Amino acid sequence: MFSKRTRPSTPKESSHFLPHLVEFQQGYGGVVSEKIAAQHVQLQQEREISRASRQCVICPVLLLYGRCRTLTCQYRHLLCEVDKSVSSAVPKQGRIQFEVLKICTPTHFASRLLTLKKDESADWLKLPHKDQYENVQKLLKDYYSQPENIRKLREPCRQDKCAYKCSDGRFERVSITFLPSNSRDSDIRVKNLDSNTAIYHVKLHELVQLPEDLKGFPPLALDIRLVGCIPFNGEETWQSPDLQPVGEFLKEGDICEASICFSLSHTIFVEQLEVEQGSYRELLERNRLSRYDNEIGNCLRIMCNK
């Protein structure tokens, strides 16, 4: 009887199976050799650099806990310059009031900034985001009411600002976050800039050119994340049923107040979040929706400052 000869694995196959092998061995208390561990570290670094260069979606577990221990996770864990380049339109300290546009999870909200208090002795300063949003919507409506202005996007590039026609006929500003090599018949990933922070896929023919004067406005919606509150049941991520009880004390359109911990270009991490019924953190804990982990703030701060 002849034994079947094994075919040597290709580099591509090795890069696919190595994280699964390491995760399996660690999960069952196995010992990972120094050589395999070194190969795995190098592979992970190469993957993260590639994901960052393509601006892949940041890992939701990383944004919640400040770390992700899943070796086979397909999300991005390395912040790039686009994430760290915080514009003057995004406050880095002080206390803010904001409108909740969408409740993504119990601790993650698409929001619009309203006012800023730079320190305890300062007065509340009105921020321009709400007025700018109303102005942008009017300009979009007026501009695209002229059929000759609806021009298809011919040669899209990553980070391009363009417009997407919604199902109700409105046009919304979006930014291209991922562009496949053959974008003419593939999905393009975009992020909504103004009415929420949703990331979704569209076809190239659904995008139209945006006039230069409308490209100049900064994103008028951003993500706000409450630091330190994690799922009560120990899950790595929030589950859909967690949103229903939150609706009893937080709704879309509500005005909230919070203290800024630190910021990225698209996200403000906050604490001491106040809603109409009082401390939001206490409401989550009282309803057994979350528990507080004091170390998460340090993990997130280190992540943002790397």
Image (tube, rainbow, N blue to C red):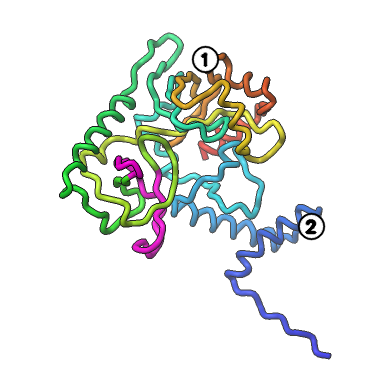
Where is residue 240 drawn, in percent x and y? 60, 38
* View extreme (top): residue: 121
Query: Which residue has dot 2 on it?
Result: 31
Mark 2, other Cα within 10 Å: few <14 / some 14–19 / many ≥20: few
Q: Identify the residue shown where x is 63% and y is 38%.
A: 239
Vertical relation: 270 (above or below) 304? above
Q: Identify the residue shown where x is 51% and y is 37%.
A: 304
Where is residue 72 drawn, in percent x and y? 63, 55
Where is residue 26 drawn, in percent x and y? 76, 54
Quadrant position of residue 17 = bottom right
Look at the image and give the residue range highlighted in magenta: 166-191
Magenta residue check for 152: no
Q: Nearer the viewer, residue 164 or 39?
A: 164
Tell me the element at label 2: loop
Query: Which residue has dot 1 on it?
Result: 276
Quadrant position of residue 168 = top left
Tell me the element at label 1: loop
Q: Identify the residue shown where x is 38% and y is 41%.
A: 192
Q: Is residue 218 visible?
A: yes
Vertical relation: 304 (above or below) 249? below
Vertical relation: 81 (above or below) 92? below
